[in-house]
Image (spheres, rainbow, N blue to C red):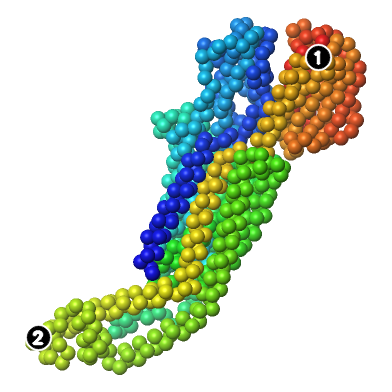
């Protein structure tokens, strides 16, 4: 049976790895985690005269480089005159040459969002009238290509390495301490450390090209590497490398001093026996276990924080709460999936004399249950934070991937329940197996005491063993040797040792056959293998999820785009004017959309209404809102208007005087707290 299991295992593992790679490859370029929520001029807009600058508003703060915002004329030549800079909050601008001729212009942007992901894109606007342009706006994303794929694969390997290293070490300390001396388990944990270290170094080298040109030749550009080290993501990767050095020391102690057997006493006959009073050694072992547990938790939490402090959890709503929750989430994942991998290795590769026992599996079952509870709690919070509404589950790519992840977790928990049942059955048969082992040892001890016939070869049993093993049979039992008594003693000792080794090998093979033939252990191995396979795919889905724009941000961007289109339509129509402007003051509860209604939007007295809504469309109050009207062409204004609060999220002012027709700039100042304030602007034709 065991001879047919190994090929099946290899085939299943290869299939699961292929599925994981397909998920990563099918993810395409990493979707931006910051989205453009507004621009001036807007996408596809046609303006009468050349603007003095181009402004872009993002859903969150972004990092700029010298070429982050580029404006190209119809011939593809740059017409921006300086480096881009922040205007207010999440709005950034780049100045343009004066007196630009009519035609279609292309605005290309390439920035890095606050959660470390590149954001790239382009759009066009026209001066006077649209024209042909030689600039192509397709393929602007620099993370679409070999470098982007390598970066995504490196992220997957880094997650897998952390889970293997942290979860495998936790399995040894919390569930199966004898596993510290089992070589396959040691290789599993060390492989996790190597994978995490190698992938971190690779991500550090790839980072500059990933957020820049996207060229393979820039991977080893030291100047780009220097720029990366000055960013939040670069600092997180360097911190991870330093923590991995501490993790290497932890692993060395875990598989060195901790795995070392108890001291022995050498007797006068050369034999070694374990000290009869192990109390001192047991106390030292307890102290070492406590120290390794505390140190391991600190190092693992630090490694998890290197992700939490530079990615999704570090920006957006309730970042101060989201980061420790994300650390706890990653630790729970490692304890569950990493421990599962270590258990799988122990079930298939542990030596026959050191099998993983039922108590160890039962303890891991308890650890896994606690990890699942923690994952449900932290995952629910993260889902609410990243989605914001039930509709985002089905209307956004992030929500769809999250549904797939939840389905995989449910299936994984179901298979884990089956494993738990096999564990209970294995625990019931353990006392019977232990009694059989003790009986075998008792019989073996009696046989050894009856003359040590096996070791010395003086009886029929030894003769049979000698003949079966293909050893030298010229010297039969009872035949006098031609050699002197003295020189024959070393030969007899060597033969006895060889026979003992062969007997031990036969016993180990028989014990392994008996262990593998146990239906309960075989069932547990199959269920744990299925768990591990699902975990491989689950990790791939999670990696793609971290590279996907959160549902809340995607819906905000869609709402802002729709509002901008509605505003453009309203500006071109006669009668009432409606302006929708997204804002972000940067503080807690600082995002929303402010809507200005001006009726009839003509010279003279006008009725103005101001509405403030959350990104999900619900009205809410803020401490202060002010509106200014400025006609720059005639050097009129700003004309301040302070509306009165009418209802929740609704302010109004009557008799707003517009003295002259023209292209008026409407500035709205929004204050959401004592210190959080932002001004958003939009031009409108009034009169």
User: Nearer the viewer's eye, disc 2 or disc 1?
Assistant: 1
Q: Earlier in the sequence, mark 2 or mark 1?
A: 2
Q: Position of residue 419 (x, y in %)?
A: 54, 66
The residue indicated by pointer 2 is 483
Mark identifier at residue 558:
none
User: Front-most of 531 and 112?
Assistant: 531
Image quarter where the N terminus lies is bottom left
Q: Where on the picture, by quarter, is residue 262?
A: bottom left
What residue is at 66 percent from the left and 42 percent from the top?
394
How dense is the environment of label 1, judged by Cα within 10 Å: few (below 14), some, or many (20 and up)?
Answer: few
Residue at (89, 22) in percent of width and height: 653
Q: Whole-Å distance between the Cαs marked 2 and 1?
A: 123 Å
Q: Position of residue 452 (x, y in %)?
A: 27, 89
Image quarter of residue 373: bottom right
Q: Is residue 377 left or right of residue 480?
A: right
Would you say residue 542 is visible in this rendering? Answer: yes
In depth, the one of 411 and 583 nearer the eye is 411
Instruction: Answer above or below: position of 579 versus 413.
Output: above
**Could you tell me which secondary element the residue under label 2 belongs to?**
loop
Dot 1: element: loop
Q: Which residue is mark 1?
A: 574
Residue 677 visible within the image? no
């Amino acid at each position: 049976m065991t001879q047919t299991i190994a090929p099946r295992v290899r085939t299943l593992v290869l299939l699961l790895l292929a599925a994981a790679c397909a998920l990563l490859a099918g993810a395409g370029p990493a979707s931006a985690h910051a989205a453009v929520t507004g621009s001036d001029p807007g996408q596809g807009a046609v303006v009468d005269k050349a603007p003095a600058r181009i402004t872009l508003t993002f859903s969150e703060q972004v990092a700029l480089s010298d070429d982050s915002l580029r404006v190209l004329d119809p011939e593809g030549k740059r017409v921006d005159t300086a480096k881009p800079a922040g205007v207010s909050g999440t709005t950034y601008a780049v100045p343009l040459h004066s007196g630009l001729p009519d035609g279609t212009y292309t605005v290309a942007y390439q920035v890095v969002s606050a959660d470390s992901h590149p954001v790239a894109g382009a759009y066009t606007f026209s001066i006077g009238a649209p024209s042909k342009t030689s600039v192509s706006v397709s393929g602007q994303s620099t993370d679409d290509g070999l470098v982007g794929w390598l970066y995504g694969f490196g992220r997957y390997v880094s997650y897998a390495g952390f889970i293997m290293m942290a979860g495998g070490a936790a399995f040894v300390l919390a569930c199966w301490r004898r596993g510290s001396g089992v070589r396959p388990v040691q290789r599993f944990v060390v492989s996790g450390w190597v994978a995490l270290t190698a992938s971190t170094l690779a991500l550090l080298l790839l980072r500059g090209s990933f957020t820049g040109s996207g060229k393979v030749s820039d991977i080893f550009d030291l100047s780009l590497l220097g720029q990366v080290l000055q960013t939040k993501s670069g600092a997180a990767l360097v911190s991870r490398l330093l923590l991995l050095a501490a993790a290497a020391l932890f692993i060395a102690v875990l598989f060195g001093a901790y795995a070392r057997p108890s001291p022995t006493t050498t007797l006068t006959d050369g034999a070694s026996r374990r000290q009869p009073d192990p109390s001192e050694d047991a106390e030292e072992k307890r102290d070492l276990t406590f120290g390794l547990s505390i140190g391991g938790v600190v190092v693992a939490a630090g490694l998890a924080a290197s992700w939490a402090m530079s990615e999704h959890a570090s920006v957006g709503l309730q970042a101060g709460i989201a980061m420790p929750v994300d650390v706890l989430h990653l630790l729970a994942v490692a304890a569950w999936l990493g421990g599962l991998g270590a258990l799988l290795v122990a079930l298939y590769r542990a030596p026959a004399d050191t099998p993983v026992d039922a108590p160890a599996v039962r303890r891991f079952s308890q650890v896994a249950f606690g990890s699942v509870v923690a994952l449900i709690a932290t995952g629910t919070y993260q889902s609410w934070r990243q989605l914001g509404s039930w509709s985002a589950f089905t209307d956004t790519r992030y929500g769809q991937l999250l549904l797939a992840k939840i389905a995989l977790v449910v299936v994984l928990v179901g298979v884990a329940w089956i494993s738990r049942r096999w564990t209970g059955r294995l625990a019931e048969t353990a006392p019977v197996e232990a009694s059989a082992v003790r009986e075998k040892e008792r019989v073996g001890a009696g046989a050894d005491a009856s003359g040590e016939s096996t070791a010395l070869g003086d009886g029929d049993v030894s003769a049979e063993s000698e003949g079966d093993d293909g050893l030298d049979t010229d010297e039969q039992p009872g035949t006098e040797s031609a050699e002197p008594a003295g020189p024959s003693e070393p030969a007899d000792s060597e033969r006895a040792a060889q026979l003992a080794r062969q007997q031990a090998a036969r016993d180990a093979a028989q014990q392994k056959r008996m262990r593998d033939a146990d239906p309960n252990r075989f069932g547990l191995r199959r269920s744990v293998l299925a768990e591990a396979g699902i975990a491989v795919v689950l990790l791939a889905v999670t990696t793609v999820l971290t590279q996907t724009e959160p549902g809340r941000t995607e819906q905000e961007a869609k709402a802002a785009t729709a509002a901008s289109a509605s505003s453009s339509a309203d500006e071109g129509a006669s009668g009432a004017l409606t302006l929708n402007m997204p804002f972000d003051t940067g503080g807690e509860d600082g995002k929303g959309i402010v809507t200005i209604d001006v009726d009839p939007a003509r010279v003279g007295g006008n009725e103005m209404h101001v509405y403030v809504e959350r990104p999900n469309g619900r009205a809410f109050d803020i401490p202060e809102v002010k509106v200014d009207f400025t006609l720059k062409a005639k050097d009129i204004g700003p004309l301040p208007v302070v509306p009165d609060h009418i209802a929740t999220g609704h302010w109004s002012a009557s008799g707003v005087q517009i003295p002259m027709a023209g292209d008026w700039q409407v500035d709205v100042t929004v204050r959401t707290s004592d210190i959080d304030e932002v001004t958003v602007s939009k031009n409108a034709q009034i009169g």
